Amino acid sequence: MKQIEKVKEMITEHPFLRDSRITLIATMLVQEGLTGEEAVMVANNFTKAASIVRASCRLQQTIPELRGREYNDRQLKQDNVKEELGYKI
């Protein structure tokens, strides 16, 4: 079963998981074999990491000077990739 299907099943069967990412992540990790304590520790750190990534993306989106070299490389290759995929340029 794919991850998205597992998550859908969990939040369908247990509506309280819809309101807490940490609880959802921890519950899913326990099902994967982690102990409750390990799962909560990972879930807490995961949400912090996800928050950092979102903040970084938001800053780079709004402040071009903060974008990395890979962003510029992707922009240069963008037209070629679109053409390979059959999109009109």
Image: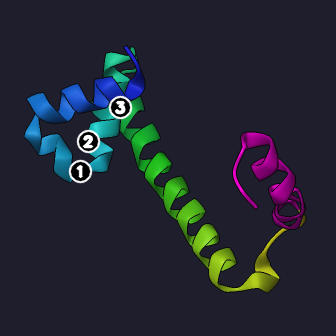
Question: Marks 2 and 1: CB-CB under 8 Å?
Answer: yes
Of 12 and 34, nearer the camera is 12
Of 43 and 36, nearer the camera is 43
Q: Position of residue 2 (x, y in %)?
A: 41, 20
Badge 3 marks a residue whose secondary structure is helix
Q: Residue at x 33, y 34 (%)?
A: 26
Distance, label 3 to label 2, CA atoms, is 12 Å
Q: Position of residue 21 (x, y in %)?
A: 30, 48
Most common SS among magenta residues:
helix
Residue 72, magenta (yes or no): yes
Q: Position of residue 30 (x, y in %)?
A: 33, 22
Image quadrant where residue 13 sits: top left
Residue with the mark numbered 3: 37
Marker disc for residue 20: 1
Q: Is residue 39 left or right of residue 57?
A: left
Query: Range of the magenta residues?
Result: 70-89
Residue with the mark numbered 2: 23
